[in-house]
Image (tube, grey):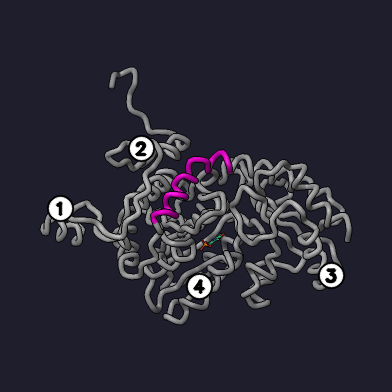
Amino acid sequence: MTEAHPPHPLHPDTLAVREAVARSQYGENSEALYLTSGYVQPSAAAAAARFAGEEEGFTYGRYGNPTVASFEKRLAAMEGTEACISTASGMSAILMMCMGLLKAGDHVVCSQSMFGSTIKLIGSDLAKFGVESSFVPQTDVAAWAAAVRPNTKLLFAETPTNPLTEVCDIRALADIAHAAGALLAVDNCFATPALQRPVQWGADIIMHSGTKYLDGQGRVMAGALCASQQLITEKFLPVLKSAGMTLAPFNAWVVLKGLETLDIRMRAQSANALQLAQWLEKCGAVQRVFYPGLASHPQHALAMAQQSACGGAVLSFEVKAEGPDQARARAFHVLDCMQTLSLSTNLGDTKTLVAHPASTSHGRLTEAQRSAAGVTQGLVRVAVGLEHIDDITADLARGLDTF
Ligand SMILES: *Cc1c(COP(=O)(O)O)cnc(C)c1O
């Protein structure tokens, strides 16, 4: 290393393809996939030290795996956190976070417009174990502050949200959490580290569903929490060891390879989404379009500052209709007229996925929870993929032009 070439931190694009390449003695260029449930120990003393956490080394598949560790290291590097721990799905990452941080009598503040299963898990399932929760309007910073109680341990936000793409101010929520001695967790599924790094704005924990854009091609389920080494080692790893929501090595390998193209996919799919949002805004059959990249979006300026000047790849729109029954029928018509795009509730795929949230992802919620989340019967969500924009608009026009 000469003075003319001082070491420098690698750029995020480089980390996405170069960080934590696990290689065996054969020197593979592509990341190795280690399929094993157990590990042979060099000595009884080494086994004891490894199980006690005093020495590096793998012991058992539920606790760790080299391919899984590569995925965790690479995602942590991309999010800018010290460490990461992965799970079998996004929901099990949320369960791990709550089990690690909360006990009976503790309180969590969440946005009303979080992912449907998140509302169900925290509001109903964890309530059975004495965890208290409040759900506040996503963009109302004063409401977040007012919901904090002496027993509040965690604030949990998702930005942009599913399906209305509401954007919240991560820095403002981090300040509220820290003033109360609580932590802020951010579900970064929609923006991904390619567009938004919540640690930069003060978040303590970044939660991912790797099932979405991190994989990016709709192949596997995965989840992760990115945070300080201390939180991972002291709070989350013990839950993984005892509860076993472990990410399978094969799934870790798929998502690890997905990270390599995350940035390029997010930018291309977001560019398509912006064009589609602009087309929908001009469409006579459409009442309203929700997309952070549009100047008409209520948090457009905040989104552009927080998300690398990019709206992301998910948008939703409401069809024009008289009353909820007609709205539902028209939304169904748009979905049923499609010939190219996929009718699917998933998101984060190179294939455009179109869904009716009120009857699917948000179908398990009560009517009150659904209307608090703003999910009306006329709402259609589009997770925009990599098809040509003209083919995407043509497929949606088939239904929108024929009410
Ligand atoms: C899909 C999703 C989850 C849950 O992830 P799974 O991998 O399906 O368990 C959580 N949050 C958001 C925003 C999601 O889109």
Q: CA distance from mark 4 to mark 1?
A: 42 Å
Residue type, mark 3 in image = Gln
Left or right for 21, reference 172: left
Residue 118 in the image: above or below residue 268? below
Residue 115 in the image: above or below residue 382? below
Q: Which residues are magenta?
A: 249-265
Q: Is residue 258 magenta?
A: yes
Q: CA distance from mark 3 to mark 4?
A: 32 Å
Mark sitting on residue 28: 2
Left or right for 61, reference 91: left
Residue type, mark 2 in image = Glu
Mark sitting on residue 42: 1
Q: What is the quadrant of the C terminus in the image?
A: bottom right
Q: Is mark 1 within 8 Å of ligand 1?
A: no
Q: Earlier along the polypeptide chain: callout 4 or callout 2?
A: 2
Residue 139 at what x, y percent from top left?
61, 60
Q: Earlier along the polypeptide chain: callout 1 or callout 3?
A: 1
Q: Foreground residue, 224 or 177?
A: 224
For the point 35% across and 37% down, the residue is 28
Left or right for 121, reference 319: left
Q: Earlier along the polypeptide chain: callout 2 or callout 3?
A: 2
What residue is pinned by disc 4? Answer: 121
Q: Residues within 10 Å of mark 3 (few under 14, many from 20)?
A: some
Q: Quadrant of residue 287?
A: bottom right
Find numbered disc 3 in the image and state the secondary structure of the residue it sits on. helix
Q: Residues within 10 Å of mark 1 (few under 14, many from 20)?
A: few
What residue is pinned by disc 3? Answer: 326
Residue type, mark 4 in image = Leu
Q: Is residue 31 magenta?
A: no
Residue type, mark 1 in image = Pro
Marks 2, 3: nearer the viewer: 2
> Does the residue at mark 1 contact the one at mark 2 (Cβ under 8 Å)?
no
